[in-house]
Structure formats: C-alpha cells, structure tokens
Amino acid sequence: MIKLHSKGNQPLSVVQHQKPFIAKVTTNCELPFGLRAKHALMMPVADCIPDGFGLVLLGHDEPCQTPVNTLRLAPELRYIKDHDVIKFYPDIAKIDVLFRKEANTNSFLVTERCNSFCLMCSQPPKDIDDHYLVDDMLAALPLIHPDTHEIGITGGETTLVGDDFIRLIQAAKNHLPNTALHILSNGRNFKNLDLAVQVSKVKHPDVMIGIPLYADYSQLHDFIVQADDAFDDTIRGILNLKRCKVPVEIRVVIHQQNYHRLSRLAEFLVRNLLFVDHVALMGLELMGFAKSNLDGLWIDPYSYKNELKEAVETLTRHHIRTSIYNTPLCLIDESIRQYSVCSISDWKNDYLDICEGCSMKNSKCGGFFSSNLRKVSDHLHVI
Amino acid sequence: MALLGKKFKLLEVFDQATNGQYQLLPSRFAALDDGRYLLSNEVGEYLVVTRPDLESFIRKQVPANTDFYHDLKSKHFLFDDDSNVALDLLALKYRTKAQRISQFTALHIFVISLRCDYTCQYCQVSRQTDDKHAFDMSEETANKALDLVFKSPSPAIKIEFQGGEPLLNFALIQYVVNEANRRNEKHQKDLQFVITTNLSLLNQEVLEFCQAHDIHLSTSLDGPENLHNTNRPRPGKNGYQLTVNGIKKAQSFLGHNKIGALMTTTEKSLPHVKSIIDTYLENNLDCIFLRPLSPYGFAIKNQQAHKYDVDRWFEFYKEGLDYVLEINRQGYQFVELYTQLIINKLLSPFSEGYVDLQSPTGAAISAIVYNYDGDVYASDEARMLAEMGNKKFRLGNVHTDDYEGIWLSDTLLDTLECSLSESIPMCNDCGFLPYCGTDPVYHYATQGDVVGHKALSGFCNKNMKIFKHIIHLLEDDPEARKILLTWVRT
C-alpha cells in the first residue's frame, strides 16, 4: 500500500507560503529560473540545492544547507517523482499527493457529500463544505502530464458540486485533450435532461460516466443505496445521458444482498440498456460502510461463481463490453477469466502469502484491496 | 436485519408499493405443454410459467418479495407503486422493435429474366424459351426500377437479382450494378448486391465482376446428388455437379462468406434430412435453412404442396435440428437459420428483417419485387401468385406508376392494414405474437383471404410447433440451450 498523504514532513528552513501550495514535482535542478517558483524540486540524494524553487523536497536524511521552503519528506512519501503533482499545507507541513505519473489510475475526490447512503460505501458521505476539493482539481489539471492515459473524478456524488461539475469536465478537456476522463456518479441527477445536455455540449473527446445499478428491480436497488426512487432516477439518468450520446458504464458491486439476482440483472441490461458502453461487475471493497455492514454484505466470491459466469455470458453474447473487477482470478470460472481486469488502484493493491508462487500474481490477477486482506475467500488457490 | 449497522434502514422501508398491490402491463400467454405456459409481453420478453403461477399473476395474487414477483417486475409484466420507470423502458423497447418500419424498404428484388436452364417441378416462375426479349428485363425497365430503389428512406439497400436464372441476362446485371453504384455516389447508402443463381453459368467473367463489386451469391442446394438432381432436373442431369463446383469456385475466388445456399423441401426430401445436412457440411457451408415448400406456382398446380402436411414437415425439421445440434456438440458450429431467427426473436431487443415473420407484413415494407416486365409486387410470393394468373398483389408498374402511387396504393395499404397481428382474430391474444407475423399472400393463396382462419392455417400450425419446440429446448435441454445461445446475433 502506498501512502498518498503524510504530515510527517519536516520543514528545515523558513516556509514562505501562506496558503496551500499546489505544484508539479521536478528533479531537474537546472530548470530555467523563471519556472522554478511554480515547481517543487525533489532531491532523492544529497546534493547542492539550487535557488528559486517554490518548494524543495529532500528524499534523504543527509545533513545539508537549506535555502527557504525546504522540507525533509516523510519516508513514506519518498517515492515522489518527476511530473507528480502535490499539495503542500504550510501550517501543518502536510503533503497530499494529488497525481502520480506512474499510477495505473489517478482519481480526484471532488466532494464527500452524497444523496445516497449505500450499504457498502467505501467513502462514507459527509455533509460538509468541501468546495476546496474542486478548486484543488482545477489547480492540478494544468500541471498534469499531457500524456496521461486517464484521470478520474470521484465522490461522494460528483454532480452535487453543481455548476462546477461542468467546469471540471471543460477544464479536463482544455488541459488534457488526449486524456480519458472517467467520472463516477450515481446518475440520479441526470434525470434532469438539462444536465446531460450540458455534459454533451462540452464535447469532451473521451469521457465516460460510471453509474452503479445494483439490482434489476426498484425495491432492492433502493434498499442497497438507501434512497427511495433511486432506481427510477438512475435509469432515467442513464437514458438521458445516452440520449445525449454521453458514454455510460454500468457498475455493479456484488454482495450478499444482490448476488442472487446477478444473472437477472444481466438480462435486464441486455433487454433495456443494451446501448451502455461498458459493464463492470465488481467485488466488494471492505472499506467504510462495507466494513461496518460486513455480516450483511460479505459473501465468498466462490459462492457466486456460477451467477457471475452466467451474467458475463449474457452480457458478452449481446456484445456489451464487460469486465470483472476486484476479484482474484482463482475465484472466477476459467471460461470467463479473460474478462477479469487488474482494476485495483496500485496504491491500495496487495497479495496474500498464499499467492506466492501463483503464475497469475502481478500479471493477470489483480489481487486484493489492501483493506480486504483480513476477510478472504476459503477457496483461494495457486493457478 | 441485525446484520446491518444502526444507521441503515430495512428493505421493507424502501418498498413504496401499496400493500403488495400491482398492476398488469400488457401481456399474452399460450399453452406450451400439459403444465406450462409461455407468458410474453408486448416487446417479446417472456417467462415460462406453471398454470397456478399464471393464474396467481393474473389474479394479482403473486406475493411481493418472491423471486417470481421480481421476475415479473424486472421483465415488465407488472408494475407497482414503488417504480414507474417500466413504462419509459417499455416505450423504448417498443420503438426499438418497431424501428424497421420507419426505415422502410431495404431489399429490392430485380427479376432479371424468367428464362432458366432448369426444369424444376416445384418452380413457380421459370420459362423455357429461346425468345430472349419476351422474358428478360430491359435497361429501360431497370432504370425505372432504380428510380424507385433510391426513393426508399432505408439507409441500407440490398439489390437482389433473381430469375428464372438471372445470369442468362448477365449484361443487365452488370448494367444495374454500375448504374446503381453511379447513382449511389449521390445517395451514399450502404449498398449491397446479391445474385440468386443456380451457378451453371458461373464463369470467370462473372466471378471477376462479383469480386470487383463485392457481390454476394445465393444458390440452391437441395441435398445429395440424387435428391438434388431429382428435385432440380436439368437437361444433361448434371445440376448437382455444376452447383457444387460453382460453390467451390465462389468460395475460393470470392471468399467463404460470399456464397450461401438455400434448400427446398419436397416430399422426396423428407426421409433424407441428415444426408441433406451432410451435403452442406461436405460443401463447407456453415448454415442451412430447412424450408417448407411454398404453396405457389407450379408447386400448387402439381399438388406438390399437398403431398405432405405440416406435421410431416415438422418431423423433418425436428430431426434436422437435432442433427444440427449434434454437429455442434461434436465441436463444429453449424447453424439452422430458421431456428436462429426464432432464437433472436426470443432473446434480442431488436427486430429481425425476415419478411414472413413481421407485423405488419414485411411485404413491400421490408422487401419489394420488380418483375422483368416492370410490374411491382409486394413480395416474391406475390409475383409467384401472379405467374399463376392472380395479380391480387400487383402494386403497379415502374413505367406507369411513381413511388407514391405504388407504396400508397390501395392494394398495399389494404394488405398492410389486414396484416397487423395485434388486430387479427386468434393472433391478437396469442402468446407467440411477438415472435410471429402474418403472411397475407400465403393466407390468400391457401384460403382465399388475406387474414385467414388461423385454426386452418398451415403457417400458424407450422410456426406454433416451431416456437414450442425451440422454447422446450431452451427450457429443458441445457446442452441444446448452450448451443442455441451461441446463435444469438446482436
């Protein structure tokens, strides 16, 4: 597991920043002077520190002379590299890593507020003013390397940021026209056609909205997201987005409450929403509410092996692009393993001792969420 | 539910249905066998249910919170106060199923010549004559027909050359292909060509032309040599050899998928379904269409169509399908096309373009026929009926009528009006309606009435048997189901 935040950084000189400082990391000591104030210089080994950088990050413990704005990085952040983007809080010497060039995915949390209250939410909603998150993302976007494959926007419910939702998509298009944009939303606010129209008008060249659908009928879906009418709102939202030709991904988290309807849900998708662009069938991440509701949610993926197989077969038979996320390969029927994707973000991805010697480790098998290591299937085995 | 934390509410809290009450959405049912019924809705989703389950559904007594209730709700047979998005989705699915009607005519059949080098007993239309001009289409007629072709709103246009033997008038095929391509530079349609031919005249010139213009070939192969030559006599008795040689040449020169074959069932075919299928395998064809004999043309004059009845044909079909499934179980994908059509009607949200199984009829909407003399017919069957002297389904002539005159003719509009299953006695309450269609020309030819009495209809009898058989395979034979599901195309 990689730490993305740390307060364990030690200022070694005067810190001149009054406000949080968002900067791109460089290791180039010879960066033209005019650019230095906007950059954080990362120094993995002791060396002479040049002047003029907005921040200097020491990735070593050697003594050295220190110009202003120099920090010794907490050991867990010393992986920071060229082109990463960080946020530095001068008052508490905290650093958030907003973007890692090397990461398999980079997501921006833009709000913790939500209008649903899902049983298995890994990011439990908080009703707070967190508008700074949008500002952070808007500040970080211009600093992100233009070759980046994909960035994500996540919440909370991302559409709750109001007009900023469209601003974020527009900014992503302006600064990163070649980068795919993946947005998570429960889709409910798109029941207002106007919001879907606004998204489509941005004409982002490669946007996808990932929307969860947990059941093939309203009562069960509404119970899982703990919100009346959510099923109807979400379906209408999906229809509106597709009406505006905005790509939509359906995300199904599988757990004890819904696994028995999984193949029916696949049939429902094929009959009603065949035009969606991707379906992700996802194992449970044991974080947040999923941890506190564990007894009501946990099911050994081995027990829904057949339901998963049938669902994948139904979806792929009708040419819906389908992926299996967050499920160790050894628990997936061999005939559908080709649909499994290493989906877990690298910073929270781990394997178990039992995985030692498995030919699929670190290749075709995505392993586990770091948070899931203590509750695992009884049927894990080496392939 | 103590399994969840205190902040979370129970499932019941989110059920806004009033006392487990529900309302029925439009649906129909039909008996499948002794104990079971097919329950289908307006857009073709279905459930196979027992009699008690069916009754409890209709009496609105299905208990909420049972899988049966959720199946009925998920497949839009009922809705309750918890959700009304079912109506939006049903509307969307209905539009999807009906989309082909808005696209209108895609298949345009040009009868290039009635002349033929064969003397098939069952043939409806061919002529033996040395007088080329009497039964060949002229360039002038072809041009007028092309005027009509390009008036169709369909984004995809397929021009099929038929006969007789159309290659006897190959110069006109070349003319039509070149002229259609020239006109299409302006129209930008997805334009395809098919030549329906017995392949006797397939020479290098024809092959090169087909290759240059990406033309598909469709031929007739009735089975093994003896059967083929008996069904399809040709002076010289070498029809089979000419056909299989032609298939081979076309496969290697044009590509495997550029040639398909159709078979016609005669009384003599009935005992030989396996060897017919084997003939298809031997000739590297990966599908077969087990077709019944149509009751038109010489077939009816010669009493061919009456020599065996639907029940006997169904046994032939069933034996054939069993054999096809066995071939698939042995590891070779081979498809029976009528079954594939029905499987798709059962499992796909889209409609199928097959003319005979549509409501309203696909005649003139999906396909139209321009006869060699410029007469326009609603379907190939309508032209065959005309060749027997009954021009009931003649819609006009390319030389005297314009697009509006033909497609808005009383003949066509009356026929279409009479061909909506939803309003036809015995069809309108049949559970198989979403998968079936009406064939007004067939019913007119056999009963003298475009609607017809379905209890006496061979069309209805045949299709009911096939639907029941295929649903039985899907429900009760897991191995067959697995194979049939691989035949779904989207």
Image (cartoon, rainbow, N blue to C red):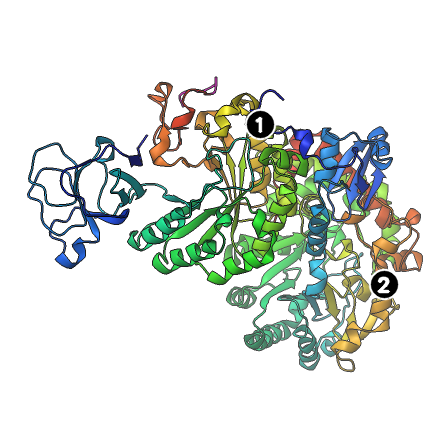
Q: Where A90 sits versus A162, above or below?
A: above
Disc 1 element: helix
Q: From which residue to which does the magenta span run?
A: A377-383
- Nearest to the observer: residue B380 or residue B93: B93
Up-down relation of residue B129 to residue A375 (above or below): below
Q: For residue B310, what is the image quadrant? A: top right
Real-space CA distance between mark 2 and mark 1, rounded to the nearest whole angstrom: 48 Å
Residue under mark 2: which chain is it in?
B
Queried whether the magenta region covers residue A381, the answer comes back as yes
Task: Label the magenta part by its dominant secondary structure.
Answer: loop
- Say which mark, if any, is on residue B417: 2
- Residue A357 in the figure: left or right of residue B413: left
Secondary structure of residue under mark 2? helix
In this rendering, would A108 be left or right of A124?
left
Residue B382 appears in the figure: yes
> Residue B276 falls in which quadrant of the image?
top right
The residue positioned 49% from the left and 40% from the top of the image is A127
User: Is residue B120 covered in magenta?
Assistant: no
Mark 1, other Cα within 10 Å: few <14 / some 14–19 / many ≥20: some
Judge from the rendering whether residue B188 lies leftward or rightward of residue A61; answer left or right.
Answer: right
Q: Give the residue at x 54% y 64%.
A: B214
Image location of residue A337, percent across then percent down: 47, 32
Neighbour class for label 2 at 10 Å: few (<14), some, many (≥20)?
A: some
Q: Which residue is mark 1?
A: A306
- Nearest the viewer among B233 and A326 is A326
Would residue B33 be visible to someone looking at this image? no
**Which residue type does callout 2 highlight?**
Glu
